[in-house]
Image (cartoon, grey):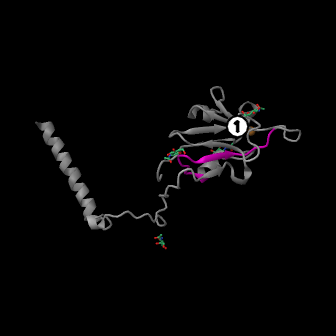
Amino acid sequence: MALIRKQSLLLIAVIVTLFALGTSNPNFPKGPQNWKFDFNYTNEPFRHPKPAQGSRRIIIGGSNNWRFGFNYTEWARTNAPFFFNDTLVFKFDPPSDTNIHPHSVYLLPNLWSFLRCDLRWAKRVANTSQGGGDGFEFVLNKWKPYYFACGESNGFHCQSGMKFFVIPSFLWF
Ligand SMILES: *[C@@H]1O[C@H](CO)[C@@H](O)[C@H](O)[C@H]1NC(C)=O
Ligand SMILES: *[C@@H]1O[C@H](CO)[C@@H](O)[C@H](O)[C@H]1NC(C)=O
Ligand SMILES: *[C@@H]1O[C@H](CO)[C@@H](O)[C@H](O)[C@H]1NC(C)=O
Ligand SMILES: *[C@@H]1O[C@H](CO)[C@@H](O)[C@H](O)[C@H]1NC(C)=O
Ligand SMILES: [Cu+2]
């Protein structure tokens, strides 16, 4: 009995709060005639319209491509958000006489491996010769965190900055 009273009091409190919010906010729609969506986000810095599906092709590192001595964690932070179905493009030269320290792309299984550049359970997604030409393409087609790293020199490239993670966003985050 007492429990039911408590619950209905809580429900009333919630309803009253919602009502108060609704009447105090002049932008809150007050009837069906005002119920429209505004897709103009120019004044809302925290929301981005979702780009058309599959429309984005992002070169990792921009003009730096995928190289040693560049901080990709920093790059990913400033280039977020990344969206579901975005295509990430890794560009790096294949091994040759003039390129004796080539790169690769690995997926690390979790944050712990990522932080430590622990490649033991990593999965290679591109070998050292797959980043040539138009680059190696990777589509963010699962809703999960992706931990990327270069797998060369036993984790040294990773520790020097060749790693980043992305969490693809479905909508407007
Ligand atoms: C979006 O809002 C800006 C600033 O208020 C305005 O200049 C622009 O014309 C609007 N665009 C559309 C498509 O409504
Ligand atoms: C992602 O791409 C796949 C394959 O092109 C498509 O079937 C799917 O609808 C897309 N999903 C979203 C949420 O854009
Ligand atoms: C890298 O992978 C490609 C495509 O699977 C394969 O053709 C090539 O032989 C591999 N190269 C090396 C160095 O493993
Ligand atoms: C890269 O930048 C991140 C974020 O600013 C920083 O925490 C990290 O130590 C940097 N990594 C290297 C290898 O400098
Ligand atoms: Cu590397």
- Which x, y percent locates residue 16? 21, 55
Residue 108 figure quarter: top right
- The residue that appears at 12% across and 37% down in the rendered structure is 2
Q: Quadrant of the N terminus?
A: top left
- Mark 1 CB within 8 Å of ligand 5: yes
Categorize mark 1 by other alpha carbons within 10 Å: few (<14), some (14-19), many (20+): many
- Which x, y percent locates residue 9? 16, 46
- The residue that appears at 14% across and 39% down in the rendered structure is 4
Is 143 magenta? The answer is no
Count of labels in the image: 1
Q: Report the front residue among 85 and 172.
A: 85
Q: Report the front residue among 156 and 100.
A: 100
- 37 left or right of 19 in image: right
**As drawn, which residue projects farthest toward the left?**
1
- Which x, y percent locates residue 102? 79, 38
- Dot 1 lies on which element? loop
Report the magenta stretch's main SS: loop
Residue 112 figure quarter: top right
User: Measured along the vertical axis of the image, is residue 22 above or below residue 60?
Assistant: below
**As drawn, which residue projects farthest toward the top?**
120
User: Measured along the vertical axis of the image, is residue 149 above or below residue 37?
Assistant: above
Residue topped by disc 1 = 150
**As drawn, which residue projects farthest toward the right?**
97
Part of the protein shown in magenta? 78-94
- Which x, y percent locates residue 33? 28, 67
Amino acid at pointer 1: Cys
